[in-house]
Image: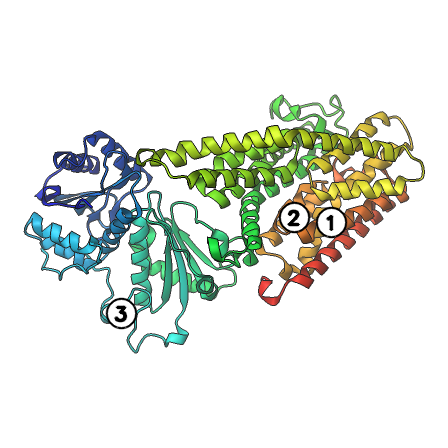
Amino acid sequence: MTEMITADLVRLDVELGSTKEEVIRALADVVATAGRTSDADTLVVDALARESTSATGLPGGIAIPHCRTEAVQEPTLVFARLAPPVDFGAKDGPADLAFLIAAPAGGDATHLQVLTKLARALVKSEFTQALRGAESADRVVELVSAVVSPQGAAAPAPTPAPTPAPSTEPTPATAGAHAGAQPGAGTHAATAPAPDARPSLVAVTACPTGIAHTYMAAEALEAAAERAGVDIHVETQGSAGSTPLAREVIAAASAVIFAVDVGVRDRSRFAGKPVVSSGVKRPIDDGDAMIAEALRYAGDPGAPRVEGDASAAGADGHGAEETWGGRIRRVLMTGVSYMIPFVAAGGLLIALGFLFGGYEIVNHPEVATDNTLFNLPDPAALELDHALFGSGFFAYLGGLLFVLGGAAFGFLVPALAGYIAYAIADRPGIAPGFVMGAIANTLGTGFIGGIIGGVLAGVVAHWIASRPVPHWARGLMPVLVIPLGATLVSGLVMVVLLGRPLIKATQALTDGLTSLGDRPGLAILLGVVLGLMMAFDMGGPLNKTAYAFATAGLGAAATATDAPELKVMAAVMLAGMVPPLALALATVVRPRLFTVPERENGKAAWLMGASFITEGAIPFAAADPLRVIPSIMAGSAVTGGLAMAFDVTLRAPHGGIFVLFAVGNIIGFLIALIAGMLVAAAAVIGLKSLSNTDTDLVTV
């Protein structure tokens, strides 16, 4: 392997410019002069692009501009001792030690692992002091080579430095660790807590390039934990690969620290843990404060916590040790956790739209786009008879909220599919996953189609990513080849193979319902069937088929007084209200059976269910389909049957409890709704109680 640093890549006590941009350009010229690149301009562009994401200045007068680039074929280190120092954005002032780290865009694991050793060494004061005291380029090469050598030798003893950096290492008074003890796991002086009493923390560090800050942050956290007498285990999600933390290590931790500038892989493993979150630079600047904050959160029941299902973290997230059931659950929970904000925001906005604008606002979304506060609509002219107080302002506000909520709901299935694909294939799976979610909306396959599309996109993206490719093509894989190939393949499967069968199935269901409704004496059975369909896929093809069947009949019965079509509409709306309301009720009755995000979503589900937004139940069903879906189907079936038995009628196509003025037999309406809620809530509580153990439950 070519030496990463040689004497001709070292500059001592030189003036390379007055700004960091000028210094980076000068260091790139050094790389070109040494024959390590023929494209210094590209190296400068890539280094400055990385610099624009966050400053690379570090405490103690250090700067580490770095990048992954096509401009070099071998990892290259350039070192300059700057005189005068130059500002690289560190809080404590300008840098006099600058490393330009240039890693090949397709660098292999060995190269990247060597660079991580340098990154870790740079937060140790004895190493930086030795660099400041070096009298020759050869001495600098010797110091750096000792750190990055495959044997991992320690840096030579420091020589006196004319301008020593502030120490980031523990002093004897604060650390008391043995020489050679591993950070975060060393033996401490008698003043430290006993081994069995030592708090334990876990952390994840990650930066966009995964070369320098990822590992420097890890080193800084380990050193800070050592000073605090705390055990810490750090997972570095960098370019050199990542070894996931063991399940038992995460379970034993009192809190978790996320020092990341990108998403945390398999975040659900840490679900329910108190969390301190920051960018990747904060632990380098102030690791002691982060450790103290994590310890404080560990004993605080009101501390922020990692979202997700604690039981979904049952496997530690990597291949061979994860069961198929655990893997499926983890993938679904990832999609659901990112989908919940769209459900809550969209559903509540739509509900408020009904409140202010009346249920007719569904047919007049143009109220929000064709009017303004200075040109308010006329509710009477638009037949918005039930806009709050009959006011043009409230009609406009209702239309605006309805349009905003509908836009948010439009992202529900794409977000679910996109982040399911992300859970399978990491970031390259997001784009094809979102596209498959949009295709599911176009095909009318609902959230079930989104799940299928997301899994398909993720599997295809993962398969493409695992294919061996030439060295020159590695940089193109995550940004071009994988998204393009996965979108094309999974899109063809969704549209060509799955689209027509789903459309035919939907049409067959519609025809079957029509024939059932035409047979006298089967009204209650029709209500039961409609209830089952409304709850099964919560906005998917079965739900939409039942709703379309009801609304089509409602139009034909507009002038009738007691037409069967009005009863069908009532049964469909009531059955669609049951799933979110029942699950909201269950989270109140037995909160320990639900995760923290589910309990939060349950609060929003009250209003969503009351507004006839069945999609409010999707987060619960996607996370635990085998127990939730049968339960809500039972409740909705009871409600649908009772609504038909009580001859409840409804003239409004939407609105839930906000359209009680359009209901015939309000008492029967309420009885059918409450009965179904109780049945569904009891069923889901019973099923979850039978299969959950104490370790599955999430403490309130």
Instruction: Give amino acid for label 3.
Output: Thr
Q: Are marks 1 and 2 in contact (CB under 8 Å)?
A: yes
Q: Quadrant of residue 417?
A: top right
Instruction: Give amino acid for label 1.
Output: Ile
**Which residue is located at x 73 percent, y 44 percent?**
535
Dot 1: few (<14), some (14–19), or many (≥20) neighbours within 10 Å? many
Q: Quadrant of the C terminus?
A: bottom right
Of the two numbered discs 1 and 2 on the same chain, state the one appearing first in sequence: 2
Of the two numbered discs 3 and 1 on the same chain, state the one appearing first in sequence: 3
Residue at mark 1: 632
Dot 2: few (<14), some (14–19), or many (≥20) neighbours within 10 Å? many
Residue 371, position in %: x, y? Answer: 62, 22
- Is residue 101 left or right of 344 when viewed as pictured? left
Label 3 or label 1, whichever lies nearer to me, is: 1
Q: Nearer the viewer, residue 107 or 79?
A: 107
Q: Are marks 2 and 3 in contact (CB under 8 Å)?
A: no
Residue at mark 3: 174
- Is residue 141 left or right of 363 when viewed as pictured? left
Residue 334, position in %: x, y? Answer: 53, 47
Element carrying mark 3: loop
- Image colouring: rainbow
Residue at mark 2: 621
Q: Eyeballing the image, is 336 above or below 349? A: below
**Which residue is located at x 43 percent, y 49 percent?**
264
Residue 687, position in %: x, y? Answer: 70, 59
Is any part of residue 567 visible from this angle? yes
- Is residue 595 left or right of 73 when viewed as pictured? right
Is any part of residue 387 visible from this angle? no
Q: Nearer the viewer, residue 75 or 609?
A: 75
**Which residue is located at x 85 percent, y 25 percent?**
556
